[in-house]
């Protein structure tokens, strides 16, 4: 520290008392390493900077602190002037000014009961005149410091009214604690910030986890046709100011809001963020165990709207998707990198949901590797034109069209159950006109929802200020297109910002004209980008104002949001000025909110890696491992009688060796042949991603497409049965239900936009009495390796074929139950061979769990000499052929 005197060295001596840190500078070196804010006396004429608690004190400072710890008695008389003394510190230990953002220091008064003499208490007693003179008045300034500090100063020769130093030339006043804020320069005062806003923020509502949703009145207007809509668009000179947009908000409120925002223009960002964090009662909710705060915003919104996103219902209140049904919950997440919204939805629904996403490529892309709370394998990014190689720019019309086509193809032309949008970009320095700068982005998010959401589906999108006719017009178009609409600011959205969410429930049929109109608006905006003309209105103001209920809701929502923002900004302003202020209810509010929203209050933890053997035993729990290695029974003339109860069996065409497949997440996939000892090997040269804690019975099959030289081969996983799906144990369910859930699971993890990945499919299952349908799918085809000789092939549902090895026959009715056909009632029924009971509904005890299906399965090998196709001629009389098996089935089952 440069004290400004070339001939005088100084020594920092610290009092490390528990209630106050004081310091004096006296006959030492001019440099001291310091840390925490301290009060100083200095022997030079100038002091620059904020000094902090020493990290490398001089020898005298160390001696003084030792004296304080030992509680030595005060010195009797002031020391006489000494020769300059040099500290032994090296140049490497020179003083460093504190760069703390929070430099306030609060005084402690733990020693108030002790007598507080002046610093010169050991000096000779003054006369009566001096007691009433200026020295006594000066001494009263030092009485606030504790006795130890006073004794230390007295030992170093300090007298009230005199300066330190050989000639008493040091300053007489205490160096005041710095009032530096954040990273401002010392002494810098921000013009316009230090003043008073004259806004009472202390009457804000008591923070609560309970929130109220207010819907727009239900629209009774009909959806305009294309001819009417084409006259609604209005162009005009481009404008970049918001101050005069007072149609949907009073002028006073708007200008007060803009003034409150402008107050922070010159404030350093970190200082603002610290005050904002301390002032917001909901701040510590943060992202919980998700990757960011956006996930908790979605949890907040989903709860407040009766879980209409993660558990959508029809108008009668019946769930549209059920976990035990085959219907997936389809959703999309646009302009939403890194993907917090999707992580929440997939955490809530897991493999019962399938997500699609489009966002800008680059630093704002989806970070699926950071989905610690949910299986990211169920989410498929798509970047518009070019698929995974696209740029993800939602404002390009061709990207919106490509994303729409992709979603429709992936959802069997039904569309999404809901779409989420969270778009925004940096408008630093232009925050007041954020609404104008992001208008096209808002339009394109609305357009993407209208293009991909199914009839009856939902939409949620982040918005900012809604003052201009353009953005209010966009809201009006959604108001016409959906059954209900709400503008909602969740408590997880900071009160000082303009962020709100528009929540739309139930897309109406016949809304295509509005979608096409939005598409034309986007084309026009792209055409006008480089001009001084802009689209100013998309719905005439007269139309909006004529809808009185919509107009009043819009004005009330804007003005209410303005009032909340103004108070929140005033509160932050106060917290910047007074760093002792803090919101004491944050912990309780966080706890209440997490409990209400059904989100566990736990830390975010990276998923632990696991050994496949340990994970296998963990998943199967106490199950008998030996049941996994049971050998399949060969179907022959001697074992054919095992299937005489024809209705008890299902059959599957095999194409390879049966294996067990275990996924530890992503591409960590292992297979085991089912032989002891248990040895899992990594599935090499295979590009496939599956959620962790998944255990399947599979075949790895080489699929073929085409014939001759153009034939393509690819290895695929064919699922025979499901045991555990992303942690859900399904082994005890009926075989048909396990297959249904496996198909749902595979549909969720499949990524049609990734041709580089190996496919995974569920085997087609046939009733044994319908075996003839299998033979229809068999044909002779030439393969590359067949030397021109046709080989038996089985063609699946997607026109890919493989070389079949035989037929699995699986028992699906558990003893003592069997299935039979009632000719009187013309339907099947269950019969108990032990109790002689019969019933048309399936008894729970008749369900065959996985272990029984696996143990009692049979396999009919289609090897040399077995005829299953009419073109085959070589017959082995000792082996079963198609005609024999079909005759046996017909004999035992005649409906």
Image (cartoon, helix red, strand yellow):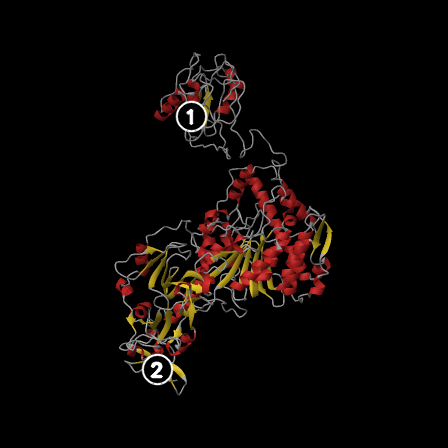
Q: Which image quadrant is residue 449 in?
A: bottom right
- Residue 782, horizontal then vertical, whole percent: 43, 67
Q: Position of residue 187 (x, y in %)?
A: 57, 29
Report the front residue among 327 and 19: 327
| Position above or below: 669 against 109 | below
Q: Callout 2: helix, strand or loop?
A: helix
341 vs 686, nearest the viewer? 686
Identify the residue shown where x is 69% and y is 61%: 548
Of residues 541 and 490, the one drawn nearer to the viewer in this rendering? 541
Q: Residues within 10 Å of mark 1 (few under 14, many from 20)?
A: many
- In the rendered image, which residue does mark 2 sit on? 887
Return the residue at label 1: 15
Numbered label attached to residue 199: none
Residue displayed at 29% across by 81% down: 833
Disc 2 residue crowd, few under 14, some 14–19, many 20+, Cα 10 Å: few
**Mark 1 touches mark 2? (CB < 8 Å):** no
Which percent across, then down, holds residue 877? 29, 78
Report the front residue among 621 and 850. 850
Q: Element type at marker 1?
A: strand
Q: Is residue 424 above or below residue 778?
A: above
Q: Quadrant of residue 632?
A: bottom left
Q: Quadrant of the C terminus?
A: bottom left
Q: Is residue 132 visible?
A: no
> Is 437 situated above or below 116?
below
Q: Is residue 298 left or right of residue 693?
A: right
Residue 367: x and y, percent?
A: 48, 50
Q: Is residue 277 left or right of residue 82?
A: right
Q: Measure how far apart labels 1 and 2 are at the Cα level.
A: 104 Å
Which mark's residue is nearer the viewer, 1 or 2?
Answer: 2
């Amino acid at each position: 520290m440069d004290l400004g005197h070339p001939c005088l060295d100084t020594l920092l001596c610290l009092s490390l008392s528990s209630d106050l840190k004081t310091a004096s500078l006296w006959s030492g070196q001019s440099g001291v390493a310091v840390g925490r804010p301290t009060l100083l006396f200095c022997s030079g004429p100038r002091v620059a900077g904020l000094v902090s608690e020493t990290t490398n004190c001089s020898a005298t400072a160390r001696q003084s602190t030792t004296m304080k710890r030992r509680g030595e008695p005060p010195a009797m008389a002031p020391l006489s002037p000494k020769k300059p003394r040099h500290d032994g510190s090296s140049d490497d230990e020179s003083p460093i000014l504190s760069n703390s953002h929070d430099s306030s220091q609060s005084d402690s008064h733990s020693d108030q009961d002790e007598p507080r003499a002046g610093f010169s208490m050991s000096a000779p007693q003054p006369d009566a005149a001096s007691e009433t003179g200026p020295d006594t008045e000066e001494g009263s300034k030092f009485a606030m410091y504790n006795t130890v500090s006073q004794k230390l100063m007295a030992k170093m020769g300090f007298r009230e009214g005199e300066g330190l130093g050989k000639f008493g030339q040091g300053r007489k006043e205490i160096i005041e604690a710095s009032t530096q804020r954040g990273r401002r320069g010392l002494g810098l005062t921000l013009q316009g910030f230090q003043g008073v806003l004259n806004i009472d923020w202390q009457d804000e509502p008591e923070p609560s986890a309970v929130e109220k949703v207010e819907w727009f009145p239900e629209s009774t207007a009909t959806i305009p046709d294309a001819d009417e809509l084409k006259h609604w668009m209005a162009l005009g000179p481009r404008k970049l100011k918001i101050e005069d947009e007072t149609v949907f908000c009073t002028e006073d409120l708007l200008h007060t809001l803009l003034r409150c925002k402008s107050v922070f223009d010159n404030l350093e960002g970190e200082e603002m963020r610290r005050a904002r964090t301390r002032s917001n009662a909901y701040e510590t909710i943060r992202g919980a165990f998700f990757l960011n705060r956006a996930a908790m915003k979605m949890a907040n919104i989903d709860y407040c709207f009766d879980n209409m996103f993660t558990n959508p219902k029809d108008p009668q209140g019946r769930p549209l998707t059920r976990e035990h049904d085959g219907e997936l919950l389809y959703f999309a997440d646009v302009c939403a990198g890194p993907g917090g919204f999707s992580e929440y939805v997939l955490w809530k629904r897991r493999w019962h949901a399938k997500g699609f996403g489009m966002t800008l490529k680059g630093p704002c892309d989806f970070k699926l590797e950071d989905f610690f709370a949910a299986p990211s394998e169920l989410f498929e990014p798509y970047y518009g034109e070019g698929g995974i190689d696209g740029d993800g720019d939602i404002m390009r019309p061709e990207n919106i069209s490509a994303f729409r086509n992709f979603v429709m193809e992936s959802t069997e032309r039904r569309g999404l159950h809901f779409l989420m949008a969270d778009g925004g970009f940096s408008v630093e320095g232009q925050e007041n006109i954020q609404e104008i700068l992001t208008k096209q982005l808002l339009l394109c998010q609305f357009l993407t929802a209208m293009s991909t959401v199914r009839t009856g589906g939902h939409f949620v999108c982040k918005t900012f200020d809604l003052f201009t006719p353009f953005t209010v017009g966009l809201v009006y178009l959604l108001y016409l297109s959906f059954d209900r609409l709400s503008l909602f600011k969740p408590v997880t959205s900071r009160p000082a910002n303009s962020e709100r969410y528009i929540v739309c429930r139930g897309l109406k049929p016949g809304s295509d004209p509005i979608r096409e109109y939005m598409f034309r608006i986007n084309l026009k905006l792209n055409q006008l980008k480089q001009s001084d003309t802009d689209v100013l209105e998309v719905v005439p103001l007269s139309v909006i104002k004529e809808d009185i209920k919509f107009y009043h809701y819009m004005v009330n929502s804007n003005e209410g949001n303005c009032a909340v923002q103004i108070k929140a900004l005033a509160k932050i302003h106060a917290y910047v000025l007074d760093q002792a202020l803090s919101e004491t209810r944050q912990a309780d509010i966080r706890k209440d909110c997490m409990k209400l929203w059904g989100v566990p209050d736990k830390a975010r933890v990276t998923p632990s890696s696991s050994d496949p053997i340990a994970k296998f035993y963990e998943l199967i729990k106490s199950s008998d491992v030996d049941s996994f290695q049971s050998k399949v029974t060969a179907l022959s003339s001697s074992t054919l009688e095992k299937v005489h109860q024809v209705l008890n069996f299902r059959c599957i065409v095999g194409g390879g060796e049966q294996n067990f497949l275990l996924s530890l997440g992503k591409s960590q996939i292992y297979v085991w042949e089912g032989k002891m000892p248990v040895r899992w090997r990594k599935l090499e040269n295979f590009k496939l991603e599956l959620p962790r804690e998944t255990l399947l019975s599979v075949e790895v099959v080489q699929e073929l497409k085409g014939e001759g030289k153009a034939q393509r081969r690819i290895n695929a996983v064919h699922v025979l049965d499901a045991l555990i799906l992303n942690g859900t144990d399904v082994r005890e369910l009926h075989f048909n239900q396990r297959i249904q859930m496996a198909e749902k699971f595979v549909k969720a993890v499949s990524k049609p936009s990734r041709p580089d990945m190996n496919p995974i499919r569920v085997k087609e299952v046939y009733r044994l009495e319908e075996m003839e349908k299998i033979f229809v799918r068999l044909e002779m085809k030439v393969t590359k390796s067949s030397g021109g000789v046709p080989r038996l092939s089985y063609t699946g549902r997607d026109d890919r074929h493989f070389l079949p090895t035989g037929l699995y026959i699986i028992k699906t009715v558990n003893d003592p139950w069997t299935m039979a056909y009632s000719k009187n009632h013309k339907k099947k029924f269950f019969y108990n061979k032990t109790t002689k009971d019969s019933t048309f509904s399936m008894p729970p005890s008749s369900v065959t769990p996985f272990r029984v299906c696996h143990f009692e399965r049979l396999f009919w090998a289609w090897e040399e000499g077995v005829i299953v196709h009419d073109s085959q001629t070589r017959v082995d009389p000792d082996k079963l052929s198609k005609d024999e098996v079909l005759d046996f089935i017909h004999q035992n089952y005649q409906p």
